[in-house]
Image (cartoon, rainbow, N blue to C red):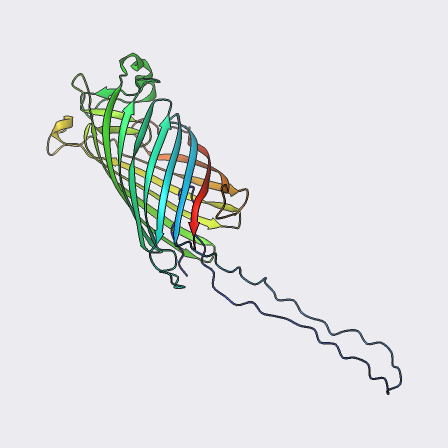
Amino acid sequence: MMSSRLPPCLRPLCLVLGLSLPAAAQTSAATPELPPVAPTAPPEVTPPSEPPPPIPRAIPDVRVYLSSLNVFRYNPLGLESQNRLVAQKRLFDSPSVLLRDTFVNAALSLKLSPASYKIGPTVDIQPLAVLNVRAGYEYMQFFGTMGFLQSFPDAFRDFSDDIRQDGEDGAYSTTGHHFFIEPTLQAKVRSIALRTKFAIEYWNVDLRDGGTTFYEATPDTLVPGKGWLFANDTDLIWLGTQWTVGLRYSAVWPRYDEAQGVPEGTSANNSHMRVGPLVAYAFNTDEGTRFNRPTVLANVAWYLKHPNREEALPYLLVGFAFNSDIVSSR
């Protein structure tokens, strides 16, 4: 059986179909005309081996909600609050597993950190429960604080933590534009879910002093000042009522050309890959309220490949996520 989309704090919707098995005990009344007899124990009722499955929650026809994810990251170091105000419309009113949780939505996204903010619209469409596509744009403002933003003349430069710490005085404030499209495939069989999200991104940032690349902490690589970057996150997870545990694989591949000092026929390999366990715990599983599914989450990962992080020190992310329904119409 396949399930619906996987929302922002690592949670696909569980579609469970089934019928409860009623059990009843029948007792017979004693007949007055008959002589009294020894009392007889009532017949035993064997309980079902499993509780009846829950009724799938009703999918709102129209929904307006706030989604929030707040994370702290180490190796690389980072702190960010990601918030989206979403207006959503259901596409199909169908009991089908593939069509039940289908929708289109539009959102305003705001990401805040001590070094920058990013704001812009996003659009999601989920025509099938196994497929979601998000497209969006972000206007970015870097404050010039905490060593961000630092630019480099080409894609071959060392951008390790030590180098960037030494170059903090050269950080400056600037603006830029970020376009992206993120197709996601997802499926669920019983309590096991598989989700893979691809990202196709175009960056256009106003770099100074001859810079053609810059360091961005989220992809943790040298991003072309004007160019493309590809990424992937793949999760294999077990879903409990409140617990989610699994394994995450992440990879980033920046693309360079002659504008970043990489002639045709050569390459600057600043891609990286990491893998490790993830876990999330939802304090409650409420939906349709002002404080839905408050969840703590963590991901620890070791780098399989990175230009300057292939030591034993792992990547660490901890976060807190929730969403809040503002309007929900059946």
- Residue at coordinates 45% horizontally, 55% vertically from top-left? 14
Left or right of 282? Residue 199 is: left
In the picture shown, does residue 281 fall above or below 191? above
**Quadrant where the N terminus is found in the figure:** bottom left
- Residue 302 image-quadrant placement: top left
Using residue 249 as the reference point, say whether residue 293 is left or right of it: right
Between 136 and 92, the one nearer to me in the picture:
92
Q: Which residue lies furthest to the right in this view?
A: 35
| Residue 200 screen position, x and y as percent | 24, 41
Q: Quadrant of residue 82?
A: top left
Q: Position of residue 226 (x, y in %)?
A: 17, 30
> As rendered, which of 210 and 37 lies closer to the eye?
37
- Tell me if I can see residue 11 in this picture: no
- 89 horizontally vs 28: left or right: left
- The total of numbered circles placed on residues is 0
* Quadrant assignment, res 95: bottom left
Considering depth in this image, is 147 or 313 the residue closer to the camera?
A: 147
> Relative to residue 208, is residue 16 depicted above or below?
below
20 vs 57: above or below: below
User: Is residue 225 shown to the viewer in this render?
Assistant: yes
Q: Which residue lies furthest to the top in this view?
A: 169
Q: Residue at x 33, y 38 (%)?
A: 108
Front residue of 158/136: it is 136
Spot occupied by residue 183 in the image (x, y as percentages of width and height): 28, 47
Q: Where is residue 87 in the image (x, y as percent from the top left)?
A: 35, 45
Check the picture and name the quadrant holding the C terminus. Answer: bottom left
